[in-house]
Structure formats: C-alpha cells, structure tokens
Image (cartoon, rainbow, N blue to C red):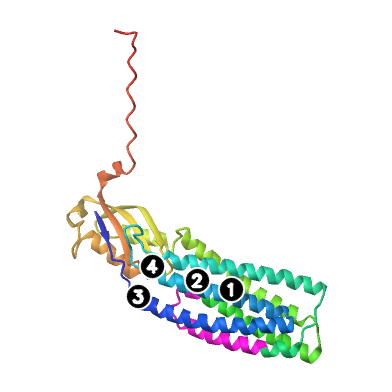
Amino acid sequence: MVGPVGHGHGHGHAGGDDRRRLGLALGTTALVLVVGAVGAVVTGSLALLADLGHVGTDVVALGTALVASALAARPPSRRRTFGLGRAEVLGAALNAVLLLGVTVWVAIEAVERLVTPTAVPGVGLLVYGLVGLLGNVVALVVLRRGSGGMNVRGAALHVLGDALGSVAVLVAAVVTLSTGWVYADTVASLVIVAILLPRTVALLRETGHVLLEGTPAGIDVDEVHDVLLGVEGVAEVHDLHVWAINDRSPAVSAHLVISDAGCATADCGEHGVLDRATVLLRDRFGLHHSTLQIEAVEHADHEQACEPPRPLPAANPAIG
C-alpha cells in the first residue's frame, strides 16, 4: 500500500517573488557590467578586470537562475513526474562552476603580475570601484530578501563576490593614490580570490550532494529510522531513502513491516499506522513528501525478484 503526501508545499508565491528579484538584480548587474568594461579598458586594472570577470559571470548566473526558477515552477507531467525542480540545482551548479573558473583565472593572472608589476591609475580605480560597489549592493539587497533557496543563494554568491571585489578595488585605489605601490591592484585581486574560492567550492559540493541524491542537511537517517520503528504496530523498517529534489523539497520513502498486532490498523485513518508515520515524518523532520509501503511480515520473502526458471534440458534425438 502506498501513502503519498501531496507535492504542494506553498512555494508558488516564493518562486514568483524570486523571479522578480532575480530580474531586477539582472538588470542592475548588466548596467554595472557595461560601466566596469569601460573602466577596465581605461585603467588596465587587473583588480577591476577580475571584478569585471565576476560581473560577467553574474549576468550569466542571474540569467541562468532566472530561467531555472521559471522551469522549476512548471507542474509535474507524465514525462517528468517530479516536475523540473532540479533545474534550480543545476542552475546553481553551473553558476558555481563558472565562478570557480573565473576565480582560478584571476589567481593565475595575479601571480604573473607579481613577477611583472603593472602600474594602474588610482583615480580610475576609485571611480569605477565606487560605481561597481553601488550596483553590487543594490543587487545583493534585492536577492537577500528572496526565499533563500539554493538557486537564489548561488546567484547572490556571485553578486557578493562582485561587492567584495569592488571593495578590494577601492582599497587598491586608495593605496595606489596614497603610496604609489604598484602591487596594490594585484594584491586586491588575490584577496578577492581568497574570499570567493571557499564559498564557491562549498556551493559546488552542496549542489553535487543534491544531484547525487544525498540526505538533506539537518536530517539524520538513523533518527528517521528509529522514529518510524517506534510507530505502534511497526515491526521493521527497511528500504529507507531520504533525498531532495531541490533544497526546499526533501522526500522520504520506506517499507514498513507491520506486526500481527498492527495489522488491524495498518490502513489510513486517525489510528492507522500509515497516518501516524506520515504525521511524524512531517512534524519531526519537515518531510512533507513521503511514500510509505505497508507490508506484512510474510511479504519480506517476496522483496527480491524471483530467479528465472531454468530451461528444460533439450531432448536427445538419439533416445527413443
């Protein structure tokens, strides 16, 4: 017997709100990209170029997040029974890969400039750094007020990287103007790398965990097993799986073996095993989507597929 709890979790409003915020952040970031491109050409700054590289990936990241959010809002179909909720996870993973690539490139370029320093005009750094920081802060505030889903967090991480990059550019500008130190711009770009790299790797690991059907954060599978086993009438729990479609939609499936005493209340109803287990999963672990198979003790013998029948030996034509 299968007891599903519906898919509707009330994310429709959050998804629409996320899309509006992503669209606004995308427009703001695109404007920053144009201004930053002009600044990088005029000044020749590596820090500004590093910041510009992150802004460029931000435009791609925000666009990807916007498309992923729209796809995730589509209802399930016969072909995709879970819908397209994983699109948000894929979008976040793509953003993490893009940001990682840009970060590594900036690190390599910075090391080269440590060997061969390049003079950068401090005034240009200051002006374009201020413009970039203003745009980044606006976009970041907009995204921070969203749902906090993995997709939006991935986009926000890009914008945060730009904001930190703009701060580093401003610091480099001040140091350059006050001391004339030619390495200020290069050191600023390395600071950006040091700040972003751990966050990028963490997001990549998180998305990979979801895509590999890992257990959602904050849920202990052993504890879920013990809670189900503690339901009155349940003699054994097996084939327990806990996973997530995206970071907002955890799910669980399990086989509950019913004892002789529990067989009378195995079905749905206020005192049924199925309802009691479903409510516990929802209230204790936030597992709103559960699929539970109720089975008798004797059913365990049928869990494995039967071996195919062995073919009869061929008749010997010489006999007879």
- Rounded to the nearest angstrom, the CA distance separating label 1 from label 3 is 28 Å
Q: Nearer the viewer, mark 2 or mark 4?
A: 2
**Is 112 left, or right, of 291 in this rendering?**
right
Q: Which mark is residue 12?
A: 3
Nearest to the observer: residue 12 or residue 247: 12
- Rounded to the nearest angstrom, the CA distance separating label 4 from label 1 is 27 Å
**Is 42 left, or right, of 75 in this rendering?**
right
Q: Nearer the viewer, mark 1 or mark 3?
A: 1
Nearest to the observer: residue 91 or residue 224: 91
Instruction: Name the residue carrying label 2.
Output: 64
Which quadrant of the figure contains the C terminus? Answer: top left
**Which circle's residue, 4 or 1, is located before the other in the chain?**
1
Nearest to the observer: residue 68 or residue 14: 68
Instruction: Name the residue carrying label 4.
Output: 249
Three-letter amino acid code at the position of disc 3 = Gly
- Rounded to the nearest angstrom, the CA distance separating label 3 from label 4 is 13 Å
The image quadrant that residue 264 belongs to is bottom left
At 18% across and 57% down in the image, what residue appears?
265
Residue 130 painted magenta: yes
